[in-house]
């Protein structure tokens, strides 16, 4: 078979994605450096590979969509951790919901207004709105509200990295003291990566971060669209 | 295994159907997640019966998102042009989310404890 046809095949694209991800996961596990995120490195390497070989994104996506397909069932699977946390959630439903609601609204309004005032284009602003929630959820929301899903997914990863690296420091500046509320905030602001960070302190903290991550995901799904439309209806920028 | 996938995909399909209703403005996968949580809570689905596949899917979420991430190569021009507002807005918003959520929860937790 012709080699150039071979490296353009779906099979090769899927295999390359698996192997790169596995390689970088090993690298992170061995080096223990949070910043060496396997997802980010795999994306970067694939982009370099595609640019270098002149293969278009559309050609890569013929294989890639088979991997992306699993995003939606993976979101549904989040029902299991949510169910496991239901006991905690029921016991203090109101404080949790109100704190999450405030965090969700403040997060969307802040990112939309700051980016808009600084002159970002409307498609970029819409891509930024769901930035605090987990990637698969954010991608769907971004798609729905007229953002650029790929840009959203990149920003979500950056948010997760910033959150897990400087999030705890930021809360010390902002005087958030109790470990439980700090965990809740980390899951709310920095999704899975923030949850990962606080899980190191114990299962209970990971549980609160998971609550933050999931409730904020659901709230953002409901509120991102109306909030963005409302802000644009004021014609501030 | 077919049962586990059947349950998960069944919820997803139902969720996608709900999302088609005008006004049901959240993604079908989120509806699917809420439905499955509801079924678990109502004891219609036992957690052990879907646990292995759920854990597998959640553990590998980062991989599934590689292809949409690679699409970033189509938007390099936008990022080069607007990296400044993107960075400032993101940092500002993270800080506000962390502090507002955390402090409000601390405050409400105290209040609710007092009046219970």
Image (cartoon, coloured by chain):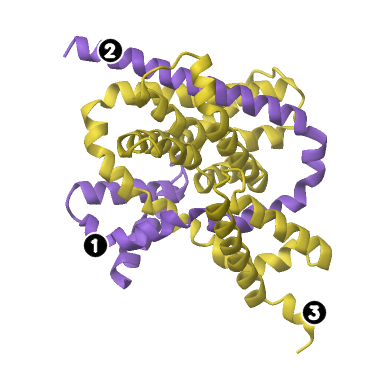
Left/right of residue B76 with respect to residue A213 in the rendered view: right
Q: Is residue A62 above or below residue B93?
A: below
Residue sitting at 51 percent across and 49 percent down?
Answer: A136
- The tint of chain A in the picture is yellow
Looking at the image, tell me whether mark 1 or mark 2 is earlier in sequence order: 1
Mark 2 burial class by Cα count in 10 Å: few <14, some 14-19, many 20+? few
**Quadrant position of residue B96:** top right
- The tint of chain B in the picture is purple
Q: To which residue does mark 3 refer?
A: A4
Residue situated in front as seen by the camera: B30 or A207: A207
Residue sitting at 73 percent across and 27 percent down?
Answer: B85
Residue sitting at 34 percent across and 12 percent down?
Answer: B107
Residue situated in front as seen by the camera: B97 or A146: B97
Chain to which the residue tagged by mark 2 belongs: B
Mark 1 burial class by Cα count in 10 Å: few <14, some 14-19, many 20+? few
Q: Is mark 1 in CB contact (under 8 Å) with mark 2?
A: no
Chain to which the residue tagged by mark 3 belongs: A
Whether residue A213 appears in this view of the structure is yes
Q: Is mark 3 in CB contact (under 8 Å) with mark 1?
A: no
Q: To which residue does mark 1 refer?
A: B49
Q: To which residue does mark 2 refer?
A: B110
1 or 2: mark nearer the eye:
2
Left/right of residue B112 with respect to residue A180 in the rendered view: left
Mark 3 burial class by Cα count in 10 Å: few <14, some 14-19, many 20+? few
Q: Quadrant of the C terminus of chain A?
A: top right
| Rendered location of residue A177, percent (x, y) | 40, 17
| Rendered location of residue B76, percent (x, y) | 79, 46
Element marked by disc 1 = helix
Whole-number angstrom distance, CA of label 2 to CA of label 3: 65 Å
Whole-number angstrom distance, CA of label 1 to CA of label 2: 39 Å
Q: Is residue A73 above or below residue B101?
A: below
């Amino acid at each position: 078979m012709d080699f150039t046809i071979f490296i353009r095949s779906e099979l090769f694209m899927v295999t390359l994605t698996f192997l790169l991800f596995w390689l970088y996961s090993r690298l992170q596990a061995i080096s223990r450096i949070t910043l060496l995120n396997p997802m980010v490195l795999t994306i970067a390497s694939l982009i370099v590979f595609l640019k270098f070989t002149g293969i278009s994104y559309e050609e890569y996506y013929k294989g890639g969509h088979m991997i992306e397909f699993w995003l939606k069932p993976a979101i549904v699977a989040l029902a299991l951790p949510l169910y496991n946390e239901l006991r905690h959630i029921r016991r203090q439903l109101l404080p949790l919901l109100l704190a999450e609601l405030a965090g969700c609204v403040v997060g969307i309004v802040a990112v939309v207004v700051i980016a808009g005032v600084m002159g970002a284009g409307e498609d970029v602003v819409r891509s930024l709105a769901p930035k605090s929630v987990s990637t698969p959820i954010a991608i769907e929301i971004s798609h729905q509200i007229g953002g650029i899903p790929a840009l959203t997914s990149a920003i979500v990863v950056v948010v997760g990295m910033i959150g897990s690296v400087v999030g705890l420091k930021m809360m010390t500046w902002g005087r958030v003291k109790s470990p439980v509320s700090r965990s809740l905030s980390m899951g709310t602001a920095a999704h899975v990566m923030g949850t990962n960070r606080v899980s190191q302190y114990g299962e209970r903290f990971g549980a609160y971060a998971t609550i933050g991550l999931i409730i904020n995901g659901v709230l953002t799904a409901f509120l991102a669209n109306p909030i963005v439309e409302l802000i644009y209806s004021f014609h501030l920028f | 295994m077919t049962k586990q996938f059947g349950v998960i995909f069944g919820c997803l399909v139902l969720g996608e159907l709900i999302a088609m209703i005008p006004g049901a403005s959240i993604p079908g996968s989120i509806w699917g997640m809420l439905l499955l949580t509801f079924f678990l809570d109502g004891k219609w689905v036992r957690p052990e019966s879907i646990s292995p596949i759920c854990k597998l899917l959640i553990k590998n979420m980062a991989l599934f998102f590689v292809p949409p991430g690679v699409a970033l190569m189509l938007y390099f021009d936008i990022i080069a042009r607007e990296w400044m507002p993107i960075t400032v807005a993101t940092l500002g918003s993270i800080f506000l989310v962390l502090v507002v959520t955390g402090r409000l929860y601390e405050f409400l937790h105290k209040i609710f404890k007092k009046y219970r």
